[in-house]
Image (tube, rainbow, N blue to C red):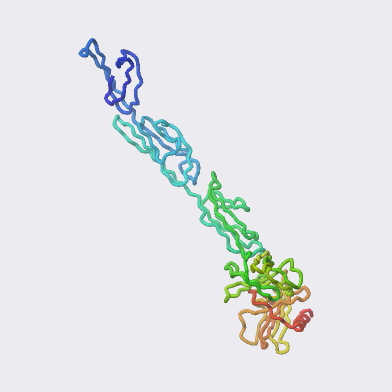
Amino acid sequence: MVNNTGIPVPPLNTDGNTPQQGSISIGPVVEQTTFTLTAYGANTQDFTKSSTLININDVTATLAANPDSGLWQQDEVTLSWSIESAVTVTLSPPIPNGPSVQNLTGSADIHPEQDITYILTVTGFTGNAPASYSFPVSLAITPVLINNFSISPSVISPDVAQNQAQLSWDTQAQAASINGIGTVNTTDTHMLPAPADGATYTLTAGTLQNPALITQSVQVSSFCGPYNFSLMAPLPGLEVEIQNPAQISNLIAQTVYNVALTGVAVVSGGSPPENYTGVFFPVPYLNITGFGLTNQPFLNYGWADPTNKTGTVTILSSTNLAGPYSFTSMVGGSFDGSPALYTFGITIPNFANQAFSYCVQLTGVVVSGGTLPPYYTGIFVQVYSLVGFTIILPPNFSIAWADPNHQTGAVTFLGIASLSPSLPDALIKNLTDKLRS
């Protein structure tokens, strides 16, 4: 038995001939093939032939994806195929347990990350003529993206107020969550209630099938420190000089701080205070920031380790003094040719630090006697439970109510001016007595 396409026909008799009757399996038959059986008599001249033609079915194939639309990154998609009469089978890109000559019908789950096109290519015959076909399936995948995740302001002041920092985010996703907050809208904002320094917020975005595909974090930073210092000066209290960090350059105004201190020791004058209070103030020409500690100014400080003259200052909490704070009492004038001093009775929940002078703006009053300054400088005095804020003007200046029928004004703090000048006790007594009355 022979054929015209070279398909091997195994002999079944020991002499190599085909038996006179029976059956054999041959193949694979991948193209139209004619098999011819020759039967011989007593010699080779006595024979007869019989032929049979085997036709090949047309090659067919299908490739489908379910679902094939509305897909997000890593969504599960079932890729299925059915192939008949193929000589070769390839899928590009390949997948595990995908279509092949040995796997003509089947399916597999895939989780595409991005837009992708699968192409099933089969070869075979059509009408007994060689043929090759390709079957593409294209999947459009929406990627999960975090377009923005930020905190504003990027630097916060510790313990000043609630809702002082805002998280903002914009994602391309079906699901989103933030640690400590929970499930959130995919694009939104959220006010943080006085977050702690160093707190990290992580935005997790994903799909309904995979809600945690990508993450991005922001960290709350503040000017809490600790800040290193290697210069220390004895002032009314103590001044330490730290490198001027940009994050506090716009925040030193309006604030008095409770701090923790390392690296210094009280060498005389008493025991060290349990808590330190102080104010940042810039020294621009030295490019440094001084931190003035005003607790118990009679104490004398020195380095805890004289051979390693370094320390740190860390902000623990702060008090916002910005205001405006209203006042309805005002006394003052020029005493004995000295600069004019006017004191306004204001109420501040956390009494301000008396060892520093502050820059302020005033409303509700009019100043005469010369060109008005853009702001005024003053200090605090304590009068019973009232805070007296005293501003200092040249001797020829005077202040009156802007509306004599409505005697009220306001003080708004702009920032720290310097260490307070030393006012005579008699002057302070004069001012306080007038406020008391």
Would you identify the image quadrant in which residue 168 lies?
Answer: bottom right
Q: Residue at 66%, 71% (x, y): give it.
A: 279
Quadrant in the picture for the C terminus = bottom right
Vertical position of residue 181 compared to residue 322: above or below: above
- Decide if residue 152 is on the left or right side of residue 324: left
- Decide if residue 426 is on the left or right side of residue 106: right
Q: Residue furthest top?
A: 42
Quadrant in the picture for the N terminus = top left
- Decide if residue 65 is on the left or right side of residue 429: left
Residue 377 picture location, percent across and down: 66, 79
Would you identify the image quadrant in which residue 401 lies?
Answer: bottom right
Decide which of 235, 255 is in the foreground and name it. 235
Q: Residue at 73%, 77% (x, y): give it.
A: 381
Residue 38 picture location, percent across and down: 26, 16
Count of labels in the image: 0
Q: Residue furthest bottom?
A: 337
Decide which of 362, 46 is in the foreground and name it. 46
Residue 122 picture location, percent across and down: 36, 35
Decide which of 5, 349 is in the foreground and name it. 5
Vertical position of residue 335 compared to residue 387: above or below: below
Residue 240 picture location, percent across and down: 65, 71
Decide which of 60, 407 is in the foreground and name it. 60
Q: Is residue 262 visible?
A: yes
Q: Residue furthest left?
A: 45
Vertical position of residue 113 compared to residue 348: above or below: above
Q: Is residue 406 visible?
A: no
